[in-house]
Image (cartoon, helix red, strand yellow):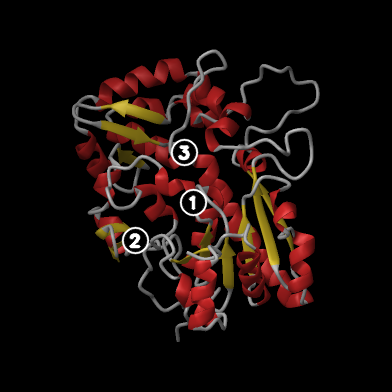
Amino acid sequence: MTSPGPLSGIRVLDLSSYIAAPYGCTLLADQGAEVIKIEPPQGDNLRKYPSTLQAEGRAFLGINRGKIGMVLNLKQPQGLEVLLRLVRAADVLVHNFRPGVPERLGIDHEALKQHNPRLIYCTVSGYGETGPLKDKAGYDQVLQAMTGVCAMQGTAQDPKIVYGSVVDYYAAALLAGTVSSALFQRERTGRGQYVGISLLRSALAMQSARFVWADNEPRQMYRDMRSGGITGLYPTRQGILYISANTPHFWAALCELVGLPRLKTDPRYETVRLRAEHADELVPQLREALAARSALEWETLFGDRVPCARVLEIEDMFDHSQVLTESMVHTFEHPTAGHYRGLSSAFKFGDAAPSLPRPAPTFGQHSDEVLAAAGYGADEIATLRAAGAVC
C-alpha cells in the first residue's frame, strides 16, 4: 500500500531566495509537502544569476523544483493581507530576510503566531539571531572563508574555495530535517514553534570531526582526517581515480589487486594511523602501480573489493546506469525553458507512491491559482493586481 509522501497535506510558504532556504523548501516538497514559493515583485535574485540557458536560470530551475509560484508585494497592505490569509491555512513559513525586515513588514514570529499558533516559523540567517554579526549578510563562500573550510582545502596562506555552495546545501538539509522534526513535535503538543538555521552553524556542523579542541592542545594541531594518508586522487594511464581503502579488508584487497601484496603484511602499515605516518613511502608506490592501467580498467578490476571511482563530470550523471536505475533523473516540461532533465527527488520512500516532479515555477505562474484556492474571487484578484499587491 502506498501513500503520497510523508509530508502530504503539509503546506509550506516559501518567502526565501538564493539557495539554502529555497532548496530546504524543495526538500520538503520532495517529501510530499505543497510548497508555495512567494516572490517579491523584483523576483528571487537567483533568477538573475548568469546562466547559459536563455529563458530561465539553470540554478533557479534546479533549486526550486516541485513548487507552486506566486508574486506578492508585502509592502502593499493588500499584499500583506493576502499573506496573512495564507498563513492562517499554512503549516510552515520559511524566509531568509535580514534581521529587522520581518518586524518592519509585520511578519515576524510573534506577529504570525497570533494568526496561526500551529505555524512552524523557520528563518535562515548568515550568523544566527544574536551576537555581533547577527545583522551581517551571510553567503556560502564568505562562511567558508570564516570557518576554516578554505584553509582546510589549501592552507591559511593559500586558501581554496570549495565550489558548489556546499554550506548552502548542508543548511538546506538541516532545514528540511529540523522543520520535519518540528512538525512531528507539533503532532504531540499541538503548538508550532520557531526554527533557526544559520550558515555559520551549518558550516561548523559539517566540520564536526575537525571542530574539536582538547585541553592543553596547541593551536596548530593536525585536525584533518585524510583517511590514512593513502586515500585520495591518483593519476592512471588514462583518467584520474579516487581510492578509499581504510579498513583492513579494503587495504589488503588494494595491495593484492595493484600487485603490491608485500605491503598488506608489513607491520609498519598495519593500521590506518600507521599508514598515515608512512604515507610518503606508500603513496609513490601506489601511484607507480596505478599508472599501469586506465582509471576505467582499475574501477572494473576493483569492483566492490576496493571503494573507488573515476573522476567524471556532472554531465556523465544524466546517463549513468546507477543513477538511471535509481530513477534519479526526470524530464521536466517547463513553460519557457522547454524540456530539460534534472534531479527527480532527493529522497526515496518505500511506501510513497511515485509522483511526477513539478518543474520550478515561472515568475508568478500560479498567483491566480493560489488566490482562488484561498477564497479570492476573480474581481478581487483583479483589484489586487491593479493595486500592485499581486503579480
Q: Nearer the viewer, residue 193 or 352?
A: 193
Q: Residue 329's x, y, as percent?
A: 30, 60
- Of the numbered discs 2 and 1, the one sitting upstream in the chain is 1
Q: Is 344 situated left or right of 45 in this image? A: left
| Distance from Cα at disc 3 to Cα at disc 2 | 33 Å
User: What residue would you read off at disc 3?
Assistant: 248
Q: Residue at x 44, y 58 (%)?
A: 64
Name the residue: 62% across, 61% down. 76
Distance Cα–Cα, label 1 vs label 3: 57 Å
Task: Find disc 2 in the rendering and name its residue.
Answer: 328
Amino acid, disc 3: Pro
Q: Is residue 297 above or below residue 60?
A: above
Label 3 CA crowd tier, 10 Å (few <14, some 14–19, many 20+): few
Residue at 28 percent of width and 47 percent of height: 53
Q: CA distance from mark 2 to mark 1?
A: 33 Å
Q: Amino acid at mark 1?
A: Gln
Disc 1, SS: loop
40 or 238, nearer to the observer:
40
Residue 78 appearing in the image: yes
- Label 2 crowding class (10 Å Cα cut-off): few <14, some 14-19, many 20+? some
Mark earlier in primary sequence (3, 2):
3
Reading the image, the residue beneath label 1 is 42
Q: Nearer the viewer, mark 3 or mark 2?
A: 2
Mark 2 or 1, closer to the camera: 1
Q: Nearer the viewer, mark 1 or mark 3?
A: 1
Q: Is residue 238 left or right of residue 65?
A: left
Residue 35 in view of the camera: no
- Which element carries disc 2, helix, strand or loop? loop
Residue visible at 23% across and 31% down in the picture:
239
In terms of image quadrants, where is residue 115? bottom right
Q: Position of residue 321 (x, y in %)?
A: 24, 56
